[in-house]
Image: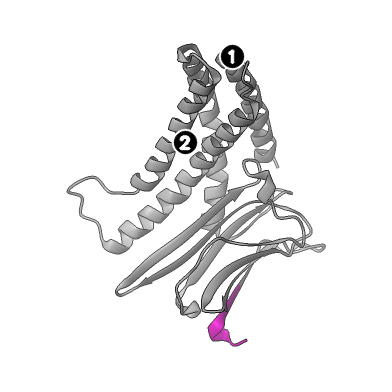
Amino acid sequence: MTALNRVALFFTGAVLAWAAPNLQVSAVSANGRIEVRLANVHSVAVDAYVVLARIDEAGRHQWKLKVHDSLLEPAASLAPGGGAVLGWDLEPPVDAWTLRAGVLHADGVFAGDPDLSAMLESGRARNLSAIPGIQESLRQAARDSASSDALLSAIAGWQSAAMRDSVTRGAPPAGTRISPAAFRQGSRDSAIRGAGELALYGWLRAAATAAALPDRSPLDLAEHLSARLDTLAADLRVRQRR
């Protein structure tokens, strides 16, 4: 396999005597497709990561983004020695793509691209600050809902709104003069910031769906979800102190 059909990036943090925390990110050409693969080659699990693949050249400007937080997507966590294939299908050639990644390990060590790693940390801080407002919205929606299904519909609407916001908030105000490159960078950064909020609402919707029994009142469901959010907030605080 030549350098032209494989790109491999190794991101390392401060070198410690016992380990060098890193996440291996590689783009591999196979059967006319390009796969992006992740491998956790650290002795500690990956707590969160962001991976950005982009082409930014004349006549061709594309980017793909994956943000993962194990607090919100536990099934997708990367254990030591574990790996994953992102659900992307990049257009060839493989060497046209630039890969960037930031990673947070379960021991609190950040590694990789410092800007992307910082976004992981700030994203968790935003989610923590958003939880009290979500709990109040849950209580209000429960009072206005005739059933648990109605409350579920309200939560689904919040998730849809977060998805729309994550797409549109990177656009500059009408009439603003901004270079195409700066606009693309702003859109990418905005999408990364919005991904955390979207994941939080996805977590909330999944928790609500699992707990919405046919005879459960919307008020009881809201209190259950509020307690789950309290636990999530406590976990976020613990991770911040590492």
Q: Does 28 sit left or right of 170 as displayed?
A: right
Percent position of residue 51, x then y: 54, 60
Q: Residue at x 56, y 70 (%)?
A: 35
Percent position of residue 82, x then y: 74, 60
- Identify whether 120 is placed above or below 86: above
Q: Does 188 sit left or right of 224 as displayed?
A: left
Q: Amino acid at mark 2?
A: Gln
Residue position for label 1: 217
Label 2 Cα neighbours within 10 Å, binned few <14 / some 14-19 / many ≥20? many
- Find numbered disc 1 in the image and state the secondary structure of the residue it sits on: loop
- Identify whether 30 is placed above or below 189: below
- Find numbered disc 2 in the image and state the secondary structure of the residue it sits on: helix
Magenta span of residues: 1-8
- Identify whether 47 is placed above or below 143: below
Residue position for label 2: 159
Colour style of the rendered protein structure: one colour
Percent position of residue 59, x then y: 29, 73
Q: Does 169 sit left or right of 211 as displayed?
A: left
* Residue in front for this viewpoint, 221 or 107: 221
Quarter-wise, where is residue 111 in the image? bottom right
- Identify whether 135 is placed above or below 105: above
Q: Does residue 40 belong to the magenta stretch?
A: no
Quarter-wise, where is residue 165 in the image? top left
Q: Does 222 sit left or right of 74 as displayed?
A: left
Q: Residue at x 62, y 16 (%)?
A: 216
Q: Amino acid at mark 1?
A: Ser
Which quadrant: the N terminus? bottom right
Quarter-wise, where is residue 204 in the image? top right
Residue at the far left in the pictured view: 175
